[in-house]
Image: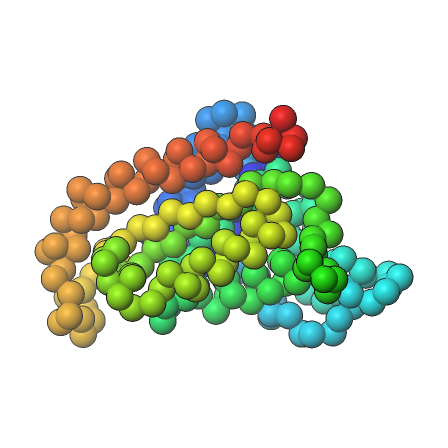
Amino acid sequence: MKVIAFNGSPRRAQNTATLLTTALEGAASVGAETELIHLYDIQFKGCSSCFACKIRNGRKYGTCGIKDELAPHLNKIAEADAILLGSPIYFASVSGEMKSFLERLMFPYLVYDKTYSSLFPRKIRTGFIYTMNVTETQMGEYGYLPHLDNNERFLARIFGESERLCSFDTYQTDYSKIVADGFDAEKKAARRRDVFPQDCENAFQMGVRLAQPTASAA
């Protein structure tokens, strides 16, 4: 069992990365081999619309035709048993790096037939961890949900099962050093102390679930 996680945050050791690492610990606790890849360490761009992945009888049919630093990591996914993604929310959606990755990840497998079927050879589990500095109520008010729903809808279509974990009202930085009068730094710090550990436990359990075989593989 191999679980691969992709960190779509520019930070390697803060909220998103911590939750991803904890989820991988959960997967490892039930015997999975794990790997964490930081997207901001890789030189790549989003889909170039070259259509190499869609050319009938083409050499690259079903695979991304771009040769860059992301290509080897995309190749690993063909052998993965589960995929875990993580991103902070920027302007109601995932980071730009994660958005570019999702294009490159999913488009080659999506068939332009009448049902938009998938070329991925089997069903695997996927998970998405989101971190954001708004509350759960604000997430709904600000229109985040349609963006998150679309991510999981496409992941489910391409790969199989998908689930979501959100960490709300996160503590981002030392607020005394930046202009951030809209936030109560003490409340944020208290939430980091009192609530974030539960988010980590939820991430750990997500990792355990991702490392279980799917119904089709069991």
- Which color mode does the image show? rainbow
* x and y percentages locating residue 145 in the rendered image: 37, 61
Against 164, residue 206 (above or below) is: above
Against 34, residue 55 (above or below) is: below
Q: Residue at x 69, y 41 (%)?
A: 122
Most extreme residue toward the front is 114
* x and y percentages locating residue 94 in the rendered image: 43, 64
Left or right: residue 112 compared with residue 38: right
Left or right: residue 176 compared with residue 171: left
Q: Residue at x 65, y 33 (%)?
A: 216
Say which quarter of the image contains residue 137.
Answer: bottom left
Observer-nearest of 147 and 100: 147
Residue 197 visible somewhere in the drawing: yes
Most extreme residue toward the right is 57
In the rendered image, the quadrant that contains the N terminus is top right
Residue 4 visible somewhere in the drawing: no
Q: Residue at x 20, y 61 (%)?
A: 174
* x and y percentages locating residue 178 in the rendered image: 20, 71
Q: Residue at x 54, y 25 (%)?
A: 31
In the rendered image, the quadrant that contains the C terminus is top right
* x and y percentages locating residue 68 in the rendered image: 68, 65
Say which quarter of the image contains residue 82.
Answer: top right
Observer-nearest of 25 and 166: 166
Against 134, residue 164 (above or below) is: above
